[in-house]
Image (spheres, coloured by chain):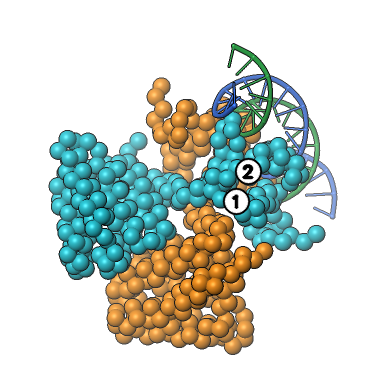
Chain colours: A orange, B cyan, C blue, D green
Amino acid sequence: MPADVRPARQGRPSLRATVTEQIKRYIIDSELRPGDPLPTEGELCETLNVSRSSLREAIKTLAALDIVEVRHGFGTYVGRLSLTALVESLTFRGLLSPTDDFRVLLDLIQVRQLFEQGMATQIVERLDVDRLTALDDLVAGLERCHDSGTSFVDTDRAFHRLLMEPLGNELISQLTGAFWDVYALVAPHLGLADRQEETETIAAHRAMVDAARARDVTAFVAAVEAHYAPVRRRITAATEQHPPHQR
Amino acid sequence: MPADVRPARQGRPSLRATVTEQIKRYIIDSELRPGDPLPTEGELCETLNVSRSSLREAIKTLAALDIVEVRHGFGTYVGRLSLTALVESLTFRGLLSPTDDFRVLLDLIQVRQLFEQGMATQIVERLDVDRLTALDDLVAGLERCHDSGTSFVDTDRAFHRLLMEPLGNELISQLTGAFWDVYALVAPHLGLADRQEETETIAAHRAMVDAARARDVTAFVAAVEAHYAPVRRRITAATEQHPPHQR
DNA sequence: TAATATTTGTACGTATGTATG
DNA sequence: TCATACATACGTACAAATATT
């Protein structure tokens, strides 16, 4: 009986690796969808002929990838397949290396900018009136947050996700959200204050909406540039002074 | 004693969640680097005051994210922080929904194209003579593979990674590799044959190198377009005929 | 409100497999 | 070959969460 999958490093695949593959196979073969229930641990143990400990470790591996979702005392379900694993992995990377973490953040910002500038033509084309109005509201929300001193972050995240939504590319949308999450999680640990530039940032958001409404790709790209430029400057400045790693 | 971390959904965080956070914290606080050894399971159990089962499940969660790496019979180490989790997650997503999987692939191709076109200016600017020569060799390698009928894939992957390397953006490089991996894993399951268009693909690769050598951004972008156009056509065609899900 | 069944979470003990020297 | 250290696997028991009655 040949091993039909990659032997990872060498030797035989571990039992847990086998079990994770079997569970994935079960989900695919049963044509389950996110949210659908899986058999209980007991049933799976019996079906796959493994102990509960081994099965649980396999389940935990799959849960980390959001391929399954476990609810205590209730059951196990097919996961939402979100990119939480990517967020966790990148966040940890950002927190891990004090000397390199600014590099990680710069990389991240560059990708976000690449998404919005590289898709500028399609974004400007496809943003309909409803979405433009919604974006207006979100910018107004940013201003309210600024005035009242409340948190910026949720509204900002929603803005950038809504911007990419009309592309109809679920991967880009999710990556946008994921990268935003990572930035929001890592930046505070680096002592990067946001508030000083909020006014500038809000203006850039508004410029993006205006450019999109005017179907002016060039102006839109410039507005995106203006949106990310201060952040990049700040990170670069922080890199140069090579601050001590806090905590 | 207040719960100092996010309550996730509701209630108290599970012990396992706490343990995973503690291990991550330990790695960061100890300033460990990828490849560095962690304490043994026994020591960690004692330090964190948890049973082996709980600890092991936490370890498995971290291993799935490549935050730690376990070597059987040898020990546990800080992981390479690769994007294997992203690859696994996206691959599974592609395999999961027969009706949508072409959509997933199209999304993927679009992002790959976005990377190469959006970064065209910098790529063309920064590719030095050595790298251009290396790219020449890789194209020659593609031709040899085509003539001898051997596998295309490794050389193609190397080409696209080398293309992005001079950007110095590790995230883009890794995402490029990850997306390539996902495509290579999912495409065969959809019955998308590659060989028919190999000649066309090789020509596009060569055009990309030539354009880069001439520092001609416009030509480079066009070559990238020509590289991905046939793939996208093929996926679109396959979508329309809505084939039965094999296996 | 309370009791109960179901399901996942945690703990511990023991035996086995694996890598290194 | 052997010894040691370590991870892997299994089984059982009980705790905690959830839903139903």
Which comes sooner in the sequence, label 1 or label 2?
1
Direction from residue B114 to residue B204 in the image, left or right:
left
Q: Nearer the viewer, residue B48 or A124?
A: B48
Q: Position of residue A117 (x, y in %)?
A: 34, 72
Q: Residue at x 54, y 45 (%)?
A: B35
Q: Nearer the viewer, residue B34 or B147?
A: B34
Up-down: is A109 above or below A227? above
Q: Quadrant of the C terminus of chain B?
A: top left
Residue tagged 2: B38
Q: Quadrant of the N terminus of chain B?
A: bottom right
Q: Is residue B60 visible?
A: no
Question: Please, what is the three-letter code of the amino acid marked with disc 2?
Answer: Leu
Asked if marks 1 and 2 fall on the same chain, the answer is yes
Residue tagged 1: B32
Question: Please, what is the three-letter code of the amino acid marked with disc 1?
Answer: Leu
Q: Chain of mark 2?
A: B
Q: Residue at x 63, y 33 (%)?
A: A52
Q: Position of residue A151 (x, y in %)?
A: 60, 77
Q: Position of residue B71 (x, y in %)?
A: 55, 35
Q: Residue at x 32, y 45 (%)?
A: B184
